Image: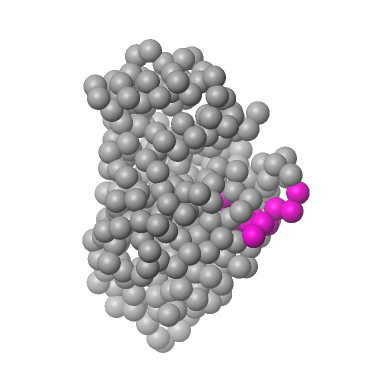
Amino acid sequence: MKYSFLLFLFFFGIVSAQNKEYNSEDLSITPLIDGTLIVPTTAEKLPLAIIIGGSGPTDRNGNQQMMENNSLKFLAEGLYGNNIASFRYDKRIVKQMKKRTIDEKNIRFGDFIDDAAAVLNYFKNDERFSKIYIIGHSQGSLIGMIAAQNGADGFVSIAGVGQEIDDVIIDQLGKQAPGLVENARDSFDDLLANGVAYNYSPGLASIFRKEIQPFVYTWMQYNPKNEIAKLQIPVLIINGDKDIQVQISEAEILKNAKPDAEYEIIPNMNHIFKKIEGNDLENSKSYNIYNLPVMPELINSISDFIKK
């Protein structure tokens, strides 16, 4: 059932391995943020792209437990081929899960913003790089657009939502589990007003269970429309028309909030940048095909934007 699949993607997973065929360096930015920097060999200064992954414990390659698709790894390597350096990193909860130090009730959305800001600050004075761009995917779009307000030279949103997260989930439920919509709306309203929700349906436990309510509550405090409008730097908004998680309408909301942004809908691209010409089953299966390349149209669009 697609509803269950989306909620799984929303909240669960773990780290996977990477290969090192490129001029790469593993870096620890903070005690919780580890990542990989790849820099094309050249005497010239190059632009650097900081790549921020989506929701759940997503690793630097875009992978989670039982979902190895290497989407972010292939994105970074594609940019490398166009003389663009990149740094991609494991979300903090990847390391916390590996060390068994994770405490869900203490996770806040702002933690991820702080992590992205720390990465940006780490590279600001690196003389190898001419400019720094932030690329945010899915949840990473909101994280990235907030972090980018602190000195990035450009921002790319891939499959980012334009609505607040409670409205996004309500829209998903309306299409996939309409019987849960009223209870979900009431629970979100309770959470926003009181900081806690008690009377939620068991079918919504993956969103409202007690341990993650503080995280969801802090996520609800950020409105992507407002945050992207604050950016005074070049912005590129991208979505695929085969994305079963984030609808094109979300990209349209971001574009309306930031009218001077560049905007592109890539035909046949799904949420993890893969080409899909079949049905939703093919789409879902692509999340666990480790060697399926990302679409070159995505690489080219981002490269052209960064090199302007």
Residue 181 within the segment the image draws in magenta:
no
Q: Is residue 263 above or below residue 274?
A: below
Residue 274 in the magenta stretch? The answer is yes
Closer to the camera in the image, 107 or 171: 171
Residue 83 in view here: yes
**Residue extent of the magenta highlight:** 267-278
User: Considering the image in quadrants, where does the C terminus appear?
Assistant: bottom left
Q: Residue at x 41, y 48 (%)?
A: 162
**As drawn, 101 above or below 148:** above
Spot occupied by residue 248 in the image (x, y as percentages of width and height): 53, 51
64 left or right, relative to 291: left
Q: Residue 285 is drawn in which quadrant? A: top right
Residue drawn at (34%, 75%) of the image = 131
Q: Main secondary structure of the magenta part?
A: loop
Residue 290, horizontal then vertical, whole percent = 65, 51
Residue 163 x %, y %:
40, 43
Quadrant placement of the N terminus: top right
Q: Position of residue 302 (x, y in %)?
A: 50, 69
